[in-house]
Image: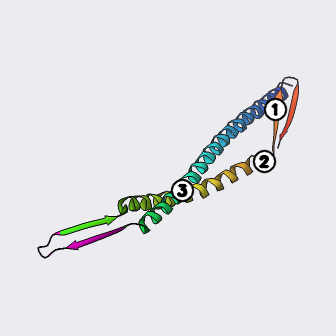
Amino acid sequence: MKIIALLILVTLCGCTYAQQQTNSRNAVQMTELEKATSKKKFGRGLTVAGGVLFSIGLIVGSNSSETTTTTNRGAIQTSSTGNPGLAKACFVTGIAGLSFGIPMWSVNASREKKLKHLQGVTITFIPQVNGLTLRCAF
């Protein structure tokens, strides 16, 4: 009788311990899901901002010109219309935003989808003093 009581006690303790691990795993998955969602949103914003800056750089660059003249004595004079410096800065910043934003957006969207799929249906058994509880979550 003592062996049976001990076996039941060990089984209930094991079930309780397994339940605690499931809860901590769910908490870790929720934290990972929140991180993936926020990184996906940041990647989306970076992509949009990079696209806008890239477009501004192209437009300003096409409307500006830079002329360099050299005299007989070797002196170089540069004259520009528009703002070619702003065009270069916007163009380079836009390319950087797009090159970092697109992969961040797509990788974290995939990670978010995978984590949402893992959260699907869970069935947990909770041993309690007055019996065993079955809980299904969708």
Query: Can you give x and y, in whole percent of width and height, for residue 100 in the image?
Result: 50, 57
Amino acid type at image mark 3: Gly
Secondary structure of the residue carrying numbered label 3: helix
Q: Where is 72 relative to 122, above or below?
A: below
Residue 85 covered by magenta stretch:
no
Residues marked 2 and 1 touching at CB (< 8 Å): no
Q: Horizontal placement of 83 versus 53: left or right?
A: left
Query: On the image, numbered disc 1 is attached to which residue?
Result: 126
Secondary structure of the residue carrying numbered label 2: loop
Query: Can you give x and y, in whole percent of width and height, for residue 40 in the image?
Result: 60, 51
Secondary structure of the residue carrying numbered label 1: strand
| Residue range of the region highlighted in magenta in the rendering | 65-75
The quarter holding residue 18 reads top right
- Earlier in the chain: of badge 2 and badge 3, it is 3
Q: How packed is label 3: few (under 14 Cα within 10 Å), some, or many (20 or more)?
A: many
For the C terminus, the image quarter is: top right
Amino acid type at image mark 2: Gly
The quarter holding residue 84 reads bottom left
Say the numbered circle drawn on residue 31.
Answer: none
Query: Can you give x and y, in whole percent of width and height, for residue 60 in the image?
Result: 44, 63
Q: How packed is label 1: few (under 14 Cα within 10 Å), some, or many (20 or more)?
A: some
Say the numbered circle drawn on residue 120.
Answer: 2
Residues marked 2 and 3 touching at CB (< 8 Å): no
Q: Residue at x 76, y 30 (%)?
A: 13
